Image (tube, rainbow, N blue to C red):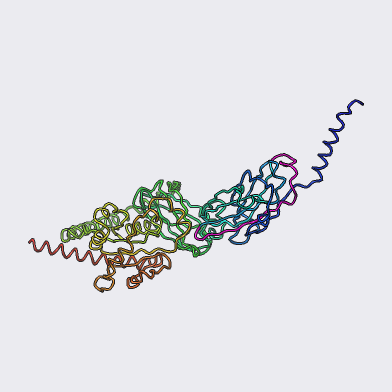
Amino acid sequence: MPAGGPAMPLVLLSLAALCWGAVTPEPMIQCGSEMGPSPEWRVQHTLTPGDLRHLQVEPIKSSVAMEDDSILMNISWILRADASIRLLKATKICVTGKSNFQSYSCVRCNYTEAFQTQTRPSGGKWMFSYIGFPVELNTVYFIGAHNIPNANMNEDGPSMSVNFTSPGCLDHVMKYKKKCIEAGSLWDPNITACKKSETMVEVNFTTSTLGNRYMALIQSNGVIGVSYVSEQNRVTQTSVIVTVTGESEGAVVQLTPYFHTCGNDCIRRKGTVVLCPQTGVPFPPDNSSSVLSGWIPVLLPALLVTICVVAIGIYIMWKHEKIKRTSFPSAMLLPPIKILVVYPSEICFHHTVCYFTEFLQNHCRSEVILDKWQKKKIAEMGPVQWLTTQKKAADKVIFLLSNEINSMCDGTCGKSEGSPRENSQDLFPLAFNLFCSDLRSQTHLHKYMVVCFREADPQDDYSALHVCPMYRLMRDAAAFSTELLHAEQHVSAGKRFQACHSRCCSL
């Protein structure tokens, strides 16, 4: 045999394998909808392919999808490298979504070529991906996938599944949803806030074309300042001065927009208060000293007269205040108006009840009574006795109505303290039934008010609340504050009369 004869067949086999890999195309996928059972399920198979090795899901922004379907699922899977891959024809993927309503859909991805090798000729495992299935906000998805032909009837079919929970509008991908864009997800206000003095904070931000009303809130261990801004529906840089009641350096400034598309549930932006930079202005050279020296003899007598007039005015005002304090000592000690707030359990406690309570305390001179703050007393007295006692002590009773539940708010509050799910007892129906008799009496009707955000009407079960004055915030904020001011004056006048009567009787 010639030298090198045994090696010749191996070389020929290697060349044949290379030629086969070059002319044989790699399998690709062609996907389409398939809601019912696959046709292969009705046929008895001697052998079937194994399950998938890996399944992964992530949201991506699609450049071809229109409007609100711009965020789609990118589902990728890896095939198991074993001999059963030669039997594989297709992979079927089904997605179930659970949110306010349930959705279900399936696609079948056929492989264009039969698999000749367990791995790619270029190396690595077989991996494919499918982009589809629109992604909604704050939704739990169950994704299942199995290979076709699947297992025969009454046999355990190999499959793989993963769970995927879509994030909210603050996510870097989900912010491109149409609903998120309308809520301000792409709006960059570029907030800057600085402390100008002990009582003033300057807030600068860029407005949006989505709306023209904004609220700037300063928080530091509670709300220490709030201000409202109205601008035209255009992008512009605006500035607002917020009066604060405490130390503001390092405090959080929260900017709440009120866009037409999302009302009171728009995305809030935050910043930090820093010290305002000191802008030193150089003094101009003193070239007018000779001119001023000529005016000093004229200005000095006028200045002395002005000081005397101011001193006399201050003395008269001091005497007046002293007489006023002596005549009405009890008027300065009058307590603020007491308000009992009742609300349904489905309302967002943190974003609605707490902000409304801070508004009453800081801007309406009110002492607020909430069941959330008196759980121990309710447990000791019982809810009926507690509501009866608080109604007698309160000057006003406010029914705070809820709007439709917003998915962003629900996602934010659902796992936090003070969320609707945390409330073990809903006192709203009980309070309505206890106070319902007062709503039929003109004598007691003035004590009750209904407050809601945006357009919300009492449900049919609480239709009796229609007789009460209703205020929609923030549209009716001025009228609402005026009503509480009248109630405060009425209560203060009654208490002042009682105080004077007691003094006269003691004399």
Q: Position of residue 295 (x, y in %)?
A: 35, 54
* Location of residue 469 by image quarter: bottom left
Please provide percent x and percent y for residue 348.
40, 57
Of residues 261 and 422, the one nearer the viewer is 422
- Comparing 121 with 232, the one in front is 121
Quadrant location of the N terminus in the rendered image: top right
Quarter of the picture containing the C terminus is bottom left
- Residue numbers of the magenta segment: 99-124
Q: Is residue 331 magenta?
A: no
Which residue sits at x=30%, y=55%?
303
Q: As drawn, is 138 to the left or to the right of 445?
A: right
123 in the magenta segment: yes
Question: Picture quarter containing residue 459?
Answer: bottom left
Front-most of 432 and 227? 432
The x, y position of residue 162, in whole percent, is 56, 48
Residue 291 x %, y %: 40, 52
Q: Quadrant of residue 22?
A: top right
Specify the farthest residue to the right.
2
Principal SS element in the magenta part?
Answer: loop
* Total numbered badges shown on the rendered structure: 0
Specify whether 118 is left or right of 388. right
Q: From the viewer's perspective, is residue 443 above or below residue 407? A: below
Q: Is residue 322 left or right of residue 85?
A: left
